[in-house]
Image (cartoon, grey):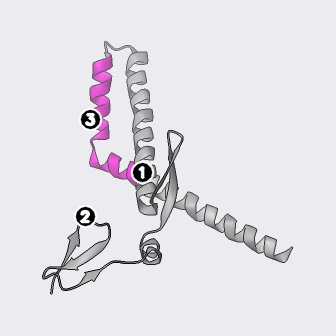
């Protein structure tokens, strides 16, 4: 017996022969995926926690790449060696496309995001322990 996902109903599984249907309850659905709030343009969206972490890492990598763009292009323009804006952008692209640079940026962003959340959880635990003593 094989199960196939029924795309017309969310989270409903039907057997291929149609002899069985499995539909998880809301409690089971919430236990499967931890969700959190993501605020985008003033709107609150409920998203899986993993997606939020991935977006945060991607934003950190993009900001790092933008800082490198400003530094490399600015350096080329300030040195004044017949460098044009296009030459600075080409140099930046060659730098950013290097796998070791990309890996370093992604690893740094990932470790930073995970550390911030770990530290926040430690503060919450310490805060709840202090409240319990009072």
Percent position of residue 97, x then y? 27, 41
Which residue is situated farthest in the front direction here?
19
Judge left or right: residue 42 versus residue 86.
Answer: right
Crowd class of label 2 (few under 14; some 14 to 19; many from 20; radius 10 Å): few
Quarter of the picture containing the N terminus is bottom left
Crowd class of label 3 (few under 14; some 14 to 19; many from 20; radius 10 Å): few
Percent position of residue 65, x then y? 39, 38
Q: Are marks 2 and 3 in contact (CB under 8 Å)?
A: no
Find out whether residue 43 is within the magenta segment.
no
- Separation of residues labelled 2 and 3 (CA atoms): 46 Å
Per the image, the residue denoted by label 3 is 94
- Between disc 2 and disc 3, the foreground one is 2
In the rendered image, which quarter is residue 4 located in? Answer: bottom left
In the rendered image, which quarter is residue 8 located in? Answer: bottom left
- Between disc 3 and disc 1, the foreground one is 1
Per the image, the residue denoted by label 1 is 55
- Separation of residues labelled 3 and 1 (CA atoms): 24 Å
Percent position of residue 119, x then y? 62, 62
Residue 8, numbered label: 2
The residue that appears at 45% across and 55% down in the rendered structure is 52
SS at mark 2 in the image = loop
């Amino acid at each position: 017996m094989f199960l196939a996902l029924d795309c017309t109903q969310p989270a409903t599984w039907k057997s291929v022969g149609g002899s069985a249907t499995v539909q998880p309850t809301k409690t089971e659905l919430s236990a499967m995926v931890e969700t959190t709030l993501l605020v985008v343009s003033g709107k609150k969206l409920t998203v899986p926690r993993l997606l939020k972490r991935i977006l945060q890492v991607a934003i950190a990598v993009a900001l790092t790449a933008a800082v490198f763009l400003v530094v490399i292009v600015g350096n080329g323009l300030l040195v004044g060696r017949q460098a044009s804006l296009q030459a600075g952008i080409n140099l930046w692209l060659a730098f950013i496309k290097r796998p070791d640079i990309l890996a370093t940026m992604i690893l740094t962003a990932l470790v930073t995001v995970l550390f911030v959340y770990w530290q926040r959880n430690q503060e919450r635990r310490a805060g709840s322990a202090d409240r319990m003593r009072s």
